[in-house]
Amino acid sequence: MLNKFMARDRRPSRQMLALLRALHEAAPRWSHGYDLMKSTGILSGTLYPLLMRMSDQALVEAEWQAPEQPGRPARHAYRLTATGLALARQVAEARDPLDSKALPA
């Protein structure tokens, strides 16, 4: 199933893996782009195109959310779809156990 979402049978990029991890940790809650940038370290010029590609692949859903405070603009929020959750779980299970990020703190 993992290969279905990767062009030319490539592994997901480091940025996609970080984004999948962050969205999986937040699931089922919605996450705003700014919060995803802070938690992953991915810059906006990479994050938003990646979110759009993931949305096109039906891995992520997006919605406009009303502002929490009057006078603030509406914001896009993102969360994994059922397909995205399955991929995030599969990636987490396939991760190298010697990867420093895979080890408990």
Image (cartoon, rainbow, N blue to C red):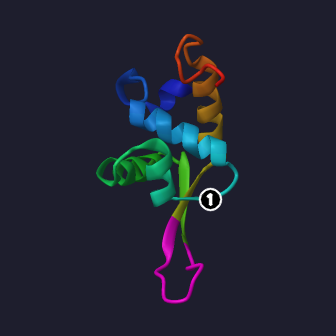
Q: Residue furthest front?
A: 105
The residue where tag 1 is placed is 30
Q: Which of the 4 image quarters holds residue 105? A: top right
Residue 68 belongs to magenta span: yes
Span colored in magenta:
65-76
Where is residue 95? Give x, y as percent. Answer: 56, 19
Quadrant position of the N terminus in the picture = top right
Q: Is residue 28 visible?
A: yes
Indicate left or right for 51 with 29 as reference. Answer: left
Q: Residue furthest right?
A: 28
Q: The residue under label 1 is which amino acid type?
A: Trp
Residue 25 belongs to magenta span: no
Look at 32% across and 47% down and name the residue there: 46
**10 Å crowding of disc 1: few (<14), some (14-19), many (20+):** some
Indicate left or right for 22 with 93 as reference. Answer: left
49, above or below 99, in the image: below
Helix, strand or loop at mark 1: loop
48, above or below 89, in the image: below
